[in-house]
Amino acid sequence: MSERYEKLAARIYERFGEQMRRIPSTCGELTYELDKDDLTEIATALRNEGDFGFEMLMDVCGVDYLSYGSDEWTTNEATDSGYSRGVDRQPVILDEADEFDARRFAVVYHLLSLQHNMRMRLRVFTGTSNPPIIHSVVDIWNGANWFEREVFDLYGILFDGHPDLRRILTDYGFIGHPFRKDFPLMGNVEVSYDADEGRVVYKPVSIEPRTLVPRVIRDDNRYAADLKDANDG
Amino acid sequence: MAEIQSYTMNFGPQHPAAHGVLRLVLEIEGETIQKADPHVGLLHRATEKLAESKPFNQSIGYMDRLDYVSMMCNEHAYVMAIEKLLGVQVPERAQYIRVMFDEITRILNHLMWLGAHGLDIGAMTMFLYCFREREDLMDTYEAVSGTRMHATYYRPGGVYRDLPDFMPKYQESKFRNQKELDRMNANREGSLLDFVDSFCDRFPGCVDEYETLLTDNRIWKQRTVNIGVVSPDRAMQLGFSGPMLRGSGVEWDLRKKQPYDVYDRLDFDIPVGVNGDCYDRYLVRVEEMRQSNRIIKQCVAWLRDNPGPVIADDHKITPPKRIEMKDDMESLIHHFKLFTEGYCVPEGEAYAAVEHPKGEFGIYIVSDGANKPYRVKIRAPGFAHLSAMSEMVEGHMLADVVAVIGTQDIVFGEVDR
């Protein structure tokens, strides 16, 4: 982490105190977590106050933390049944739950300051409500418009105060939010042309899901902070 | 007599000037645009979701297919994000190779843009001229990676292999006589670097040719001057980047301001526009081609003098040499593990951005320590630009919509992802 960023972090701490919680980074980037109620106030300050001057919002990104940190590889019974059947798939959790885990959906904002030549990242969890809802930043950075529409489309996160919250990437009349972790990779429906009816029809998918390479998490001591050589960064 | 009411017109998705599958719903009064509502997503392939289901290296090929006219720049952002998380050091020679190919890619992209933009607003010859030069650059892609477009050449830790010391040649056929063949193969006798060098000597003359056709052309100016004007403040508000931002007079280029790889050691200038209209953005991009040419020349000179490794030596991440695998057990194990399971990336998150020909192309990766990314987000410059479409065309004529689509340099591979 360079000196300039440490200075920015100090200024942020001075201005916002515990409202913005710094997340340690392994690669020299500045990440903050904040409560969703503080978002509008903090974003406005970060944009307008000369100390920060983040006049550009580069990206808005939704993240679904449902299966964070879980792998899907069982070794015991897999040998006689082959790779894809050895995979321990995540159970499907339907979205009909009344409440989500408070740390399931997050919206990540990437800010850029041209005048100070700095970047930072804000992460805001959307809380337990179903559907998740968060305040829009379109008024602060007009470029957020489509990015928020995309997050709404893919994750079903609502943006309060957005002027035109429609789906953007998926098909007209699409059902579900495809980037949620409980949405299957191959989707729920397939389309084909029905010659008898003379139109395109939707049917449930007919192909089996398969995994070519299972997801594994290995303990790698090379990246353990307390075991790292003192001199390598 | 009845007043003409405003009406709605559908433009695309199958329209030659829509640069792919853009559907625009235009509200028009007479021939003046009141509102444009772009409908995107017709090319949505869920690249980000697919990347979540594959080991890191297997998604490099998907990156080529995002902005499919600037393939290697997309790869560059992706491998940089992984390198950031892994903390790998990239050998110097690999960095020069990457920079050289990034700039070749920039010329490829701008040639494609210039040709298509010209064709859209009536300059047919440009398309033919630009594709003539693109062909040579495609051949450099082919020589280095084996494919003309979707190279999959960059790897976390370097590039897949060193530059070849020969160029593929045109073959004999009944349509070409020997004399013609010798002429076509004249600059292909030496190595790839010789070929790139000869291209660089020739290319500024080609750009002069394009400029003779367009820069002072009355029709060209009528179609572009004062069309789609964006003020610097609005450009920043709307999240513009790259030539769209520089065309509005904001001096911002990641290659200078946040240099990655070896850009800080190279000598080049950043062109900046004044008025923020289509004509200024045209001038900015044409000058960028000249500057890219300068960068390529410097890279060629350096690469000639400095042989060395082109990929990091850490075999937990990069595959060992074939020859080592033949009699070294450990190399064999490394190879097997890498190509079956891949490598695990430490938990954390990283955002890596490159100055892509179209703007800031960023990759945000969240890793939970697995061999697959937990979340990949692609920040496509075209997405932000297209979202400002309505604002840019408001009050202009219908024909200017085509000029604005052209000046935004939209490619749907990256907008729809």
Image (cartoon, rainbow, N blue to C red):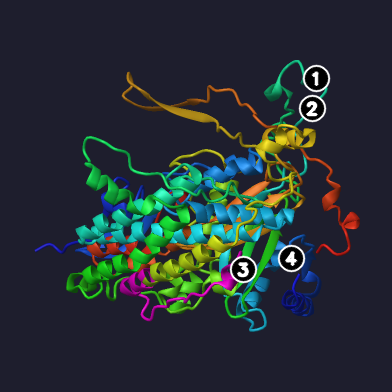
Q: Is residue B417 visible?
A: no
* Figure quadrant of residue B14: top left
CA distance for labels 2 and 3: 41 Å
The residue sitting at 79% across, 33% down in the picture is B329
Q: Which residue is mark 2?
A: A74
Q: Work out whether disc 3 and disc 1 sit on a shared chain.
A: yes
Chain assignment, label 3 = A
Identity of the amino acid at label 2?
A: Thr
Q: At which x and y percent is residue B33?
A: 27, 64
Q: Which is more foreground, mark 2 or mark 3?
A: 2
Q: Which region is colored magenta?
A: B260-286
Asked whether B161 or A163 is in front, the reply is: B161
Q: Dot 1, how many residues are within 10 Å of its Cα: few (below 14), some (14-19), or many (20+)?
A: few
Q: Work out whether disc 1 and disc 2 sit on a shared chain.
A: yes
Is there a contact, CB below 8 Å, between mark 1 and mark 2?
Answer: yes
- Residue A111 got which mark? 3
Q: Which residue is mark 4?
A: A28
Q: Which residue is mark 1?
A: A77
* Figure quadrant of residue B6: bottom left
CA distance for labels 4 and 2: 35 Å
